[in-house]
C-alpha cells in the first residue's frame, strides 16, 4: 500500500479549526490516491483527491456501492439494516425509482412557486436581528431559512420544529460533545428522526393537507404506495440534507465576507453578482467534506489495486481548490465566472446520488445573501467562530457577529 508521512487527514483533532484545506492541497499535489489507517471496523480507507478519480467512483455504482452509507464510520448492524432501506443508502435501479418520488418538489416550477414565501421568511429573519446590531448567526439566521423551507415543504407543525432540529444536530454532529454524548447517540437520533417521519405520515393520512409529504404518500414506488415507515426513512434523508448543508454554507459566507470586505462591497453595489457569490462560496467552502463508497470487487482505482470491501473516500472540496481546474483557487472571488465553478465543482457530489436539492440550496443562498447585502453594513466578528467538531461537515456551532443597519 502507498506510504506517506501524512497519515491522519480524517482525524477529529486535525479538523479542530475546520477542514485542513492546506493539507488537502499538499496531498493532492503528491497523490491521486492514498491509504490511511483509521480506528473504525475495517482499519483504514483510501483517499481520492482529483476530479476524474472522484467522478469515476461516484458515477460507477456497479463498482462502488453506497449500501454501507456515505460516512467513514460503520453503522451498527440494526441501524444499518434500517438505513439500507432509505434513499441515501440505495443503489440503482431502486434508488432511481425512489428518488423519483420527491424530485418534482425541487424542480424549477416548484421553486418558483416557493420563492415568494422564501423571500418573506428571509425578510422576517432579518427583521428579528437587524435592530439588535448583533446576533448568533448560525441559529438566528443561517439555519432559519432552510429549516423553515423544509418544514413548509414536508408539512411539519411548528410545535415540532425544535425537536426535529435537536435530532438533526445530534445526528449530523454526533462527534461534538455539545450536541451528542457519543457517535451511538447520533445513530439513535437517526432512528428517532425516522420514527418522527413515520408519525408525520400517519398524521397526514388522518388529516390530509397540502404538502410534499401528502404527495409522496399518494404516489407509488415499485408499484406500491409508500408505507409510513418507508416515508420516515425518506423524511430522515430530506430533513438532514435540506438543513445542514445550507446552514453551514451561509455561515461560511458570512465569515468570508467579513474576511474579504472588498467582496462584500462588490455584492452590495451590484446585486447581479449574487449568482456568482453563491457559486464561489460553494466552491470555496464546500460544507460536506467527503463521501464514502465501498468497493464491490477487487479492482484498480487511480492506478492502485484495491480489494472488495475497501472504503474509498472522495474528498469533495479537493477539486474545488485544484489549480489545474481553477485559476488562483485559494482566492475568494465572487466575480469568478459562475459557469466555470458549476463545471468543475464537486460540492454536491456526482453520479446517481448527486444532491437532490441542489437548486433549492442555491435558491436558499441566493435569497438570504441578497437580503443580507441589502440590509446589513460592516459585518464583523464579535469573537472567533467556533467550528463544529466533525470530519464530515464543515461548519460552525457558534458565530457571533455584529453589523450596522444599511440605510441606503
Image (spheres, rainbow, N blue to C red):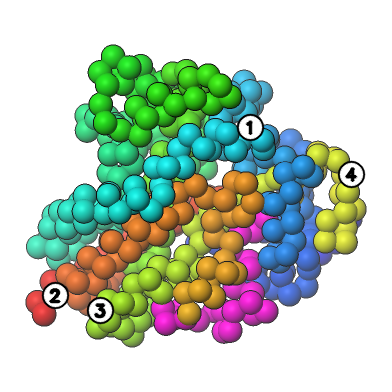
Residue 110 horizontal/vertical position (percent):
34, 47
Chain-order first, disc 2 or disc 4: 4
Which marked residue is nearer to the observer: mark 1 or mark 3? 1
- The secondary element bearing badge 1 is classed as helix
When asked about the image quadrant of residue 55, the answer is bottom right
Quarter of the view holding residue 330: bottom right
Question: Residue at horizontal 26%, vertical 68%?
Answer: 370
Q: Residue at x 34, y 23 (%)?
A: 200
Tell me where residue 51 appears, x and y as whole percent.
Answer: 68, 65
The one of 9 and 273 positioned closer to us in this rendering: 273
Circle 1 residue = 94
Local packing at callout 3 (Cα closer than 10 Å; few below 14, some 14-19, many 20+) is many
- Relative to 270, residue 133 above or below: above
Q: Do the residues labelled 2 and 1 touch (CB within 8 Å)?
A: no
Q: Residue 268 carries which label?
A: 3
Q: Is mark 2 on a helix, strand or loop?
A: loop
Q: Are marks 3 and 2 in contact (CB under 8 Å)?
A: yes
Q: Mark 4 points at which residue?
A: 298
Please report whichever mark, 2 or 1, sits nearer to the chain's N-terminal start: 1
Q: Is 366 above or below relative to 313?
A: below
> Separation of disc 3 and disc 2 at Cα?
10 Å
Residue that mark 2 sits on: 406
Q: What stretch is highlighted in magenta?
A: 313-336
Task: State how far apart marks 1 and 3 are (Cα).
Answer: 46 Å
Report the front residue among 74 and 83: 83
Cα gap from disc 2 to disc 1, whole angstroms: 51 Å
Amino acid at each position: 500500500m502507498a506510504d506517506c508521512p501524512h497519515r491522519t487527514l480524517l482525524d477529529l483533532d486535525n479538523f479542530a479549526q475546520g477542514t485542513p484545506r492546506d493539507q488537502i492541497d499538499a496531498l493532492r499535489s503528491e497523490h491521486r490516491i492514498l491509504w490511511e489507517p483509521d480506528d473504525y471496523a475495517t482499519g483504514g480507507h483510501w483517499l481520492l483527491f482529483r476530479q476524474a478519480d472522484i467522478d469515476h467512483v461516484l458515477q460507477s455504482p456497479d463498482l462502488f456501492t453506497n449500501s454501507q452509507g456515505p460516512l467513514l464510520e460503520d453503522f451498527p448492524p440494526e441501524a444499518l439494516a434500517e438505513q439500507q432501506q432509505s434513499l441515501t443508502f440505495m443503489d440503482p435501479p431502486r434508488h432511481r425509482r425512489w428518488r423519483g418520488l420527491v424530485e418534482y418538489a425541487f424542480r424549477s416550477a416548484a421553486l418558483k412557486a416557493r420563492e415568494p414565501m422564501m423571500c418573506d421568511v428571509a425578510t422576517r429573519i432579518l427583521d428579528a436581528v437587524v435592530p439588535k446590531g448583533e446576533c448568533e448567526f448560525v441559529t438566528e439566521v443561517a439555519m432559519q431559512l432552510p429549516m423553515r423551507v423544509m418544514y413548509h415543504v414536508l408539512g411539519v407543525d411548528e410545535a415540532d420544529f425544535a425537536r426535529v432540529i435537536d435530532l438533526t444536530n445530534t445526528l449530523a454532529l454526533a462527534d461534538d460533545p455539545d450536541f451528542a454524548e457519543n457517535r451511538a447517540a447520533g445513530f439513535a437520533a437517526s432512528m428517532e428522526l425516522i420514527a418522527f417521519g413515520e408519525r408525520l405520515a400517519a398524521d397526514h393520512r388522518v388529516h390530509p393537507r397540502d404538502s410534499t409529504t401528502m404527495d409522496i404518500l399518494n404516489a407509488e414506488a415499485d408499484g406500491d404506495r409508500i408505507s409510513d415507515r418507508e416515508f420516515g426513512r425518506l423524511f430522515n434523508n430530506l430533513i438532514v440534507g435540506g438543513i445542514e448543508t445550507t446552514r453551514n454554507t451561509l455561515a461560511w459566507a458570512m465569515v468570508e465576507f467579513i474576511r474579504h470586505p472588498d467582496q462584500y462591497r462588490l455584492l452590495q453595489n451590484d446585486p447581479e453578482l449574487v449568482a456568482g457569490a453563491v457559486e464561489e462560496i460553494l466552491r470555496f467552502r464546500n460544507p460536506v467534506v467527503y463521501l464514502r463508497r465501498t468497493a464491490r470487487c477487487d479492482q484498480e482505482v487511480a492506478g492502485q489495486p484495491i480489494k472488495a470491501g475497501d472504503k474509498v473516500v472522495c474528498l469533495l472540496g479537493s477539486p474545488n481548490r485544484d489549480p489545474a481546474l481553477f485559476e488562483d483557487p485559494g482566492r475568494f472571488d465572487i466575480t469568478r465566472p459562475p459557469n466555470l465553478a458549476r463545471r468543475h465543482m464537486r460540492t454536491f457530489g456526482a453520479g446517481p446520488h448527486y444532491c437532490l436539492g441542489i437548486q433549492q440550496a442555491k435558491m436558499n443562498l441566493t435569497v438570504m445573501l441578497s437580503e443580507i447585502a441589502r440590509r446589513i453594513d460592516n459585518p464583523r466578528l464579535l469573537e472567533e467562530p467556533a467550528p463544529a467538531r466533525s470530519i464530515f461537515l464543515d461548519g460552525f456551532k457558534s458565530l457571533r457577529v455584529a453589523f450596522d443597519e444599511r440605510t441606503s
